[in-house]
Image: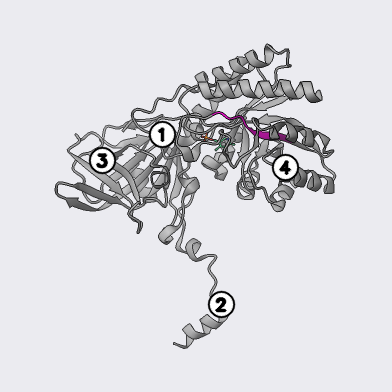
Amino acid sequence: MYLHGTSKVNDQGHLEIGGVDATQLVAEYGTPLYVFDEALVRQRCREFVDAFRASGLKFQVAYASKAFCVMAMCRIVEEEGMSLDVVSDGELYTALQAGFPAERIHFHGNNKTVDEIEMAIDAQIGCFVVDNFIELQLLNAIAGDKRQKVKVLLRITPGVEAHTHEFISTGQTDSKFGFDLGNGSAMRAIKEAASLSNLDVLGVHSHIGSQIFEVEGFRIAAEKVAGFAVQVRKETGIIFPVINLGGGFGIRYVEGHTPLPVAVYVEAITEAIKENFGNNDYPLPEIWVEPGRSIVGDAGTTLYTVGTTKDIPGVRKYVAVDGGMTDNPRPALYEAEYEAMLANRATEQSEEVVSIAGKCCESGDMLIWDLNLPKVSVGDILAVSCTGAYNYAMASNYNRIRRPGVVFVKDGQSDLVVKRESFDNIIGNDLIPARMKQVSTTR
Ligand SMILES: *Cc1c(COP(=O)(O)O)cnc(C)c1O
């Protein structure tokens, strides 16, 4: 397993993260457990911010909180001076409760509800990223009712295909998101938005996909967006003060994944903006980006305890852990790949090839196929790396399994930032109709 950030093998032959022995974390908090290397999260934040600062352009780096949205994470993002994207009232609520400054919050989504829009306007968030014509009218009407003027970016689909898994590609024409550039709806949307008196159009937004390993997609997106901005200026006189180029910066989950250093993505974006806007005598806009995965992905490690094994001679050996698709649905959803090691026997040589199964009643509940490990025993601690993004965020209670706790580790200290769910959390919203209660008490 590749050791990210502060992860290392210590003198006891154990995996250590943030200066804390993984076996100690397990003794204290149990398994499964999500562990975040706080120093690595902060390092990634700073890589983005520093690279933009070096460009000389005005910028905002907005963490796409959907990747991992808990109050302690919002605190980090706030402390690192970044902005925050939310896509639901739940994420907005989390951020506000964490004391995140509302003016640095951007609200995304292709179907924001009336309640969500009202909540966000009341909180005075910084910006809405408007996705469609219905939302344009709705937002204008609600803002009018509240006698507020709201800032908006319009999400456009620039027709750029990022090289990635189809399910997580959003820049192409056939997408549920945004106003299409190619068929003219983006231009119509700008004109309509400009005519709505309660909206203040800051510019446009484009997000071309996820887990992108090349700069080319961002360059093309910048070029298309600049071309559009120039066209808009020509037809309407409107000049965009802001251009948002989204997220999607890739990370290394397994060998063969070759992400670029954050600074390289940022430099490609800022250069492309300077070139494409500068060459058109267009005032250089403020650049916003929205990294999610690349901020938290490689900082997360999930610890599991090994339970049963099933050896099918000549076929494969299954090793089951005490979690699975409930805490990490990505292998089942996207055929996502992960690396892992035995955290309690980190220096031992690999001796067998096993496949890691989850504990859910679902054959598709597999975490890793064909993993090299030392001879595995019951009670070993399996550490799966790179689980910081879209794991806790996508976790479920399937099979009524309780969601694991989340711990931040840093400089030899561990802090619980999300408690493991209790049985009462599991049944907390269940109600038994009175007529059924009667039956059960008379038995
Ligand atoms: C998901 C998403 C992001 C973040 O994507 P990552 O791949 O996690 O960087 C940013 N912007 C928008 C609009 C998104 O939908």
According to the picture, the residue beneath numbered tag 3 turns out to be 370
Q: Is residue 100 above or below residue 229?
A: below
According to the picture, the residue beneath numbered tag 2 turns out to be 433
Q: Which residues are magenta?
A: 152-160
Spatial separation of the CA atoms under disc 4 and disc 1: 47 Å
Query: Which of the two discs, 3 and 2, labels the residue nearer the N terminus?
Result: 3
Give the residue at the far front of this rendering: 183
Circle 4/circle 2 CB separation < 8 Å: no
Q: Is residue 427 left or right of residue 121?
A: left
Query: Which of the two discs, 3 and 1, labels the residue nearer the N terminus?
Result: 1
Spatial separation of the CA atoms under disc 3 and disc 2: 48 Å
According to the picture, the residue beneath numbered tag 1 turns out to be 18
- Closer to us: 162 or 153: 162
Query: Which of the two discs, 4 and 1, labels the residue nearer the N terminus?
Result: 1
Task: Report the residue at 84% width, 38% height from top.
Answer: 197
**Colour scheme:** one colour
What crowding class fits label 4: few (fewer than 14 Cα within 10 Å), some (14-19), or many (20 or more)? some
The reply to whether the magenta stretch includes residue 270 is no
Q: Is disc 3's CB within 8 Å of ligand 1?
A: no
Query: Which of the two discs, 2 and 1, labels the residue nearer the N terminus?
Result: 1
- Determine the secondary structure under disc 4: helix
**Residue 191 in the image, given as x and y percentages of width and height:** 78, 33
- Of badges 4 and 1, nearer the viewer stands 4
- Of badges 3 and 2, nearer the viewer stands 3
- Of badges 4 and 3, nearer the viewer stands 4
What crowding class fits label 1: few (fewer than 14 Cα within 10 Å), some (14-19), or many (20 or more)? many
**Residue 55 in the image, given as x and y percentages of width and height:** 61, 15
According to the picture, the residue beneath numbered tag 4 turns out to be 133
**Residue 149 in the image, given as x and y percentages of width and height:** 81, 39
Task: Give, as a three-letter code, the residue at label 1.
Answer: Gly
Spatial separation of the CA atoms under disc 4 and disc 3: 48 Å
